[in-house]
Amino acid sequence: MTREEACARELFRELADRFEDSATGTTVTIAGGNILWKVIVTRERRACEVSVFIESALVYIVSLEEGGDLVGTATTADTQEVATVVDAWLHGDAYEFLHDAYPFVELHEKVLAGLLGEAVVLSPELHTTGEHRISRNSWFSFRLVISVGDRECRAFSGSNVSPLPTVSFTADGSDMMSLELTGLARECFPGTIRRWLLDRAMPSDIHREFPLVKLGPLVPYYEEGRLMEGEFIVSWDMVEEGVRRWNALGERAGAHNRDFFCIWERIGRFVALLREAGYDRCLRAGTAVTYFIVSRSRHYGLRAGQPSITFWLPEDRMDVITDNRSTPALSLPRAELTPEVRALLDDLVSKPID
C-alpha cells in the first residue's frame, strides 16, 4: 500500500464517520490506484472531491463542485480544515463566504494577491501605468501577470509542496530573469518589479542591485538589441543540450534500445553542420520525439500552418519534410548539407518571422 493510499483511507474513515448519513443523502466514497487517490463526499447537487498528494509533505486539494462543475478549491495539510470546508460546502454556504472566511480556500490565489499588494505598496503607479490580473490557471493553480508596455512579470502558484512561486520577468514575451521567492528573495520582489516595469532598467543592472535575481541566457542579446537572433541561437543551444543528455543516457543503456539512442548522435552531428553554416542565427530549432525541426517561429512551439522543415534521420537515410506534409520533399542516403537541402533552408530563411 502506498503512503497516498494509506492517507486516503484514513481520511475516508474520518469523513465517513462524520458525514455519511442516509437521512440527508450524504455519501462518502474512495477511489484511486497507486499514488492517485481521492475521497468524494456528495450531498444532493454539491460534492467535495479531496485529492491526496505526497511530495516532500502531505497535502489535500479539495475541489468544491456543484452540479458537476468546479466552483473553487481549498489547499491544506490539516484534516480538520478539510472537514470544516466540506461541512460548510455541503451545508450550502456560498463560495464567496468560504473564500473570505478560510485562508486555505484558493490559497494560491491569495498568495499571488499578497505579492501584487506588496508590489503596489512600493509602486502605486502600477494601478494607473500598468495592467495586472490574477486568473485561474487550472484546477487549484493561479497565475499573476503584471505588465507595463512590452515588459511583464509573471508568477505561477500551484505547487503541492509550497505556494511560493518562482517569478519570471519577460520582454516582448521572452524570459529575461527569474526570482525564486524563498527566504530573503521575497524582500527583493517589490524592488525588482519597480526596476523592471517602471524604471525599465536593464537585466544586468537589476542583477547587480539584487544578486538573487537570476539572469536568463537571452539577456546579452536583449541588451545588445539582438533579441530575435538570440532567441534563435538559444533554441539551438537547447537542442544540443538535449542531444548531450540523450547521448549520456545511451552510454548508460549500452546495447539496450541502441537504435533509438544512435539517432540522437546523428541529430547532433547534423545540428553542428547547420550551425557551422550559420543557420542558427536565422532559424529556430527544436525537436519532437526524434525529429529535428527548424522554423521562423517567433516563440517556442509551432502553430498549424507555420512554415517549417523537419528532418528524420534513421540509420540508412535522411528524410526532409517541409511544412508538415505527409511525404518527404527529399530523401537522401545520408545526413548532409547538400545544395538541395541548402535551397530548402534558404527558402525558409526568406520567410517572415512569425
Image (tube, grey):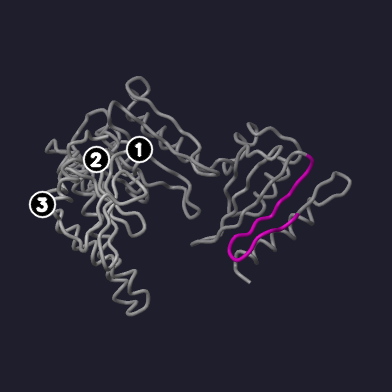
Q: Amino acid at mark 3?
A: Ala
How many callouts does the rendering have? 3
Task: Determine which residue is flagged by label 3.
Answer: 277
Q: Amino acid at mark 2?
A: Arg
Q: Position of residue 325 (x, y in %)?
A: 35, 46
Q: Is residue 108 magenta?
A: no
Front-most of 290 and 298? Answer: 290
Q: Position of residue 248 (x, y in %)?
A: 28, 71
SS category of the residue bearing label 1? loop
Front-most of 205 and 209? Answer: 205
SS category of the residue bearing label 2? loop
Q: Please name the residue shown 63% across and 59% down the image.
A: 37
Task: Determine which residue is flagged by label 1.
Answer: 305
Residues at marks 1 and 3 touching, judged by CB atoms closer than 8 Å: no
Q: Position of residue 192 (x, y in %)?
A: 28, 38
Q: Is residue 36 magenta?
A: yes
Task: Determine which residue is flagged by label 2.
Answer: 296
Q: Is residue 118 left or right of residue 232?
A: right
Q: Quadrant of residue 7?
A: bottom right
